[in-house]
């Protein structure tokens, strides 16, 4: 059986392990500690640092393919591993577009994909020029390392933009700016692609954020105009093909009155794809494993009219009621809630699990039920009572 | 999070681990070796012998509940563990009915459940009496330890029965006999039950055997008369309740022109329930975990009209084509085949995995496709070409 090496020890690696087990495999995980989410449930755990080339060499030796649960491995190390014969999927040429927001936008613009107007910000002059070009509708972003809304700023005056720019450049944060769009909502278009070319797309979903963190995914995106749906899917497929992405690609999109715009790429299983575990013939973890091993992809058909995924985000305080009792209460009220936990301890705002709810009919009710269930799991109380 | 201890290291324990991971847990497995099916994918593996009380004590210490992937743990050890405060599910009083075919039949008859005429066989005289009572339609069975058709004999003459009885009693095999029924087909009725009482039933399935080994399960059983379906379900629920079964109970049944008869009980996830992994809202592994932890049970609704499970049974010889390539060929032809492997090496006739196929319409075509896929995975050739 193939040995799939996963760099990273979070919930994405953990859920790849679930999928791998059923395929007769077991992932080899490079983990930072034995109690990390994926390390808890993998038999083959190597402790090490993903920024250390020798430790990367050790964990990837003899593997059939190497993949990731985050995009923070230095690309020069990946280049070295590839030169030494390791099968890295996706490749650094593709990954760079998920690592650097400016590189990605430049590339997507070349391809004709819809991105808001943007510019590199390397000086106060750049900032001023862009502020004027978009008439103050500026979203400033760190080019690298942002996540869950960290690294994104909306200055309300040129002075604020100037101060921010000065401060961030001074502490060495490479910056870019883009036009602040009129957000109707956020969408996510996910596909998976094999090295040998096959691509399969899941339905486009609506993703609802709260404080910069994914809160719900609703599949398929309710009321999405067919032309926008088709364009989102087309953009995702084309992006995967042109950038040579292998494994999963999530294209986070803005829906605006002027159409859709690409916001962000992720080249791995993605939070907006967790719904597929209970909503699709092939879930994103199995598909990612199949794709990076260059095996034929499975059907992305849905099993029910709607699936809602609600993230379980750590409450400000961890309630006294033990977690198993909270699960019992949730299942008493919603016996069909599919609860997924990552084996992570409590921390306010931390993603510790998600709940999938599948059904037909009233999608807003399904979303509300998902919200109630996810809320109970961290607050030990019903939001509606 | 609860610690679920599983005694046994086969594929059933392995697939409990898959379910447990998603629930934020990880089973603790008592395994005979580190490369056993479940031990390969569990982080918490204790090596030991399930017939050794001290080793059972060591692995079960501190667990929330203890359950099984087979029924071979000596009940006296389980009694001791329970006396020492360990939460064993199911209990020995229930388990004995899955261990001893005579005890089970005696008990089920008392309950009014349909069993063929049977008798204990402790002497040649018993054998002769039974032979005459059922006019030679005798099925002789070892009371304990049989599996996959081993321990079942159909003597065609009284002399053969006499010789068999003599030989088996002499080497210490406790025996029983029952009437050989007119088998139309075999069915399986599965339920899950919590210690606190809740019971949920899955649809009754047809199970097709080959050389005493489960070959296919077809869910729901095609063309099953509603009265038989309802009776099968009733028998399974009542059996679970009256025997106090906790966790899953599979009731293997004979369908005959005279109605249904119970053949066998299993108190754990069962081969005829593997289809639920891709065919039901709640699969049998998740349900078993929830049930033995006394958590509310999930919906047993089906996701599609039909699900077929085809066992992947080791071919006489292991073909040269590597397994991943065989998987590729199967997925090329049947991209929606859900392949499950157990991490087991090749051995003729050995259960090494199963394939689930889900769909609507022509169930016989689905079964054939399942057969083709499972066959290819071990023979590296298409049965129809
Ligand atoms: N150009 C824009 N116009 C309007 N709103 C924006 C724009 N860019 C980002 N936002 C808002 O800020 C949020 C965070 O932005 P972004 O997704 O780029 O950050 P991130 O930290 O990379 O997030 P993540 O990694 O979670 O996707 C978005 O979800 C969106 O609500
Ligand atoms: N009374 C009977 N009449 C006719 N056929 C029978 C009878 N009992 C058993 N058989 C046949 O023999 C097969 C094996 O019997 P049984 O299920 O009792 O054995 P086993 O070894 O306990 O099998 P397993 O553990 O796989 O269920 C059955 O599947 C059935 O085909």
Image (cartoon, coloured by chain):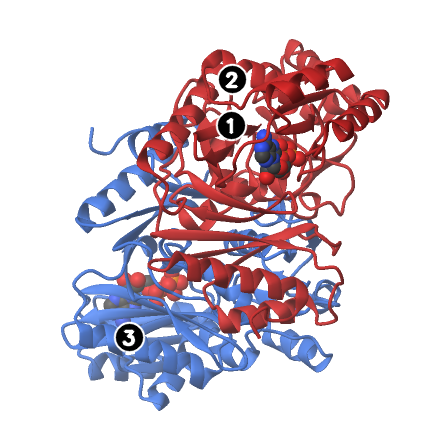
Chain colours: A red, B blue
Residue, x 45% and y 15% (percent of image)?
A112
- Tell me if B302 is positioned left or right of B226 in this view: right
Task: Note whether ligand 2 is within 8 Å of mark 3.
Answer: no
Q: Residue B122: x and y, percent?
A: 40, 81
Give yes or no for contact between labels 2 and 1 (Cβ–Cβ under 8 Å): yes
Chain under callout 3? B
Q: Residue B81: x and y, percent?
A: 69, 75
Q: In terms of depth relative to the viewer, which is nearer, A330 or B179?
A: A330
- Tell me if B249 is positioned left or right of A252 in this view: left
Which callout, 3 or 1, points to the residue nearer the camera?
A: 1
The dot on residue B232 is 3
Q: Are marks 3 and 1 on the same chain?
A: no
Chain under callout 2? A
Give yes or no for contact between labels 2 and 3 (Cβ–Cβ under 8 Å): no
Residue, x 57% and y 29% (percent of image)?
A264
Q: Residue B185: x and y, percent?
A: 21, 63
Q: Residue furthest top?
A: A83
Residue, x 31% and y 88% (percent of image)?
B112
**Which image quadrant is residue B348 in?**
top left
Q: Residue A268: x and y, percent?
A: 56, 32
Q: In which quadrant of the rendered image does the N terminus of chain B lie?
A: bottom right
Chain under callout 1? A
Q: Which residue carries the number 1 mark?
A: A262
- Tell me if A193 is positioned left or right of B23 in this view: left
The dot on residue A108 is 2
State which image quarter holds ligand 2: bottom left
Q: Residues within 10 Å of mark 2 (few under 14, many from 20)?
A: many
């Amino acid at each position: 059986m193939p040995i799939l090496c996963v760099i990273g020890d979070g919930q994405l690696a953990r859920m790849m392990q679930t999928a791998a087990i059923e395929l007769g495999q077991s992932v080899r995980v490079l983990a930072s500690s034995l109690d990390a989410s994926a390390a808890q449930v993998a038999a083959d755990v190597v402790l090490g640092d993903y920024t250390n080339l020798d430790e990367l060499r050790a964990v990837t030796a003899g593997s059939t393919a190497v993949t990731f649960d985050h995009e923070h491995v230095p690309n020069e190390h990946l280049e070295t591993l590839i030169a030494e014969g390791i099968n890295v999927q996706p490749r650094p040429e593709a990954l760079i577009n998920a690592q650097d927001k400016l590189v990605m936008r430049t590339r997507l613009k070349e391809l004709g994909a819809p991105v808001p107007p943007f510019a590199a910000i390397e000086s106060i002059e750049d900032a001023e020029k862009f502020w004027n070009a978009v008439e103050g509708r500026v979203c400033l972003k760190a080019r690298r390392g942002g996540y869950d809304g960290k690294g994104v700023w909306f200055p309300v005056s040129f002075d604020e933009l100037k101060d921010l720019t000065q401060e961030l450049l001074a502490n060495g944060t490479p910056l870019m700016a883009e036009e602040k769009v009129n957000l109707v909502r956020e969408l996510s278009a996910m596909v998976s692609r094999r090295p040998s070319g096959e691509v399969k797309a899941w339905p486009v979903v609506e993703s609802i954020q709260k404080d910069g963190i994914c809160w719900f995914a609703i599949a398929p995106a309710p009321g999405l105009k067919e032309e926008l749906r088709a364009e989102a899917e087309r953009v995702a497929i084309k992006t995967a093909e042109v950038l040579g992405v292998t494994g999963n690609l999530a294209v986070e999109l803005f829906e605006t009155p002027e159409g859709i715009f690409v916001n962000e790429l992720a080249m791995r299983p993605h939070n907006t794809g967790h719904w597929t575990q209970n909503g699709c013939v092939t879930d994103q973890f199995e598909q990612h494993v199949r794709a990076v091993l260059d095996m034929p992809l499975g059907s992305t058909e849905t099993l029910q009219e709607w699936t809602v995924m609600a993230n379980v985000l750590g409450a400000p305080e961890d309630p006294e009621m033990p977690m198993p009792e909270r699960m019992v209460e949730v299942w008493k009220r919603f016996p069909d809630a599919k609860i997924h936990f990552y084996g992570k301890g409590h921390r306010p705002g931390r993603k510790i699990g998600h709940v999938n709810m599948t059904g037909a009919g009233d999608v807003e009710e399904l979303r509300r039920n998902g919200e109630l269930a996810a809320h109970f799991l961290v607050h030990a109380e019903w939001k509606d009572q």
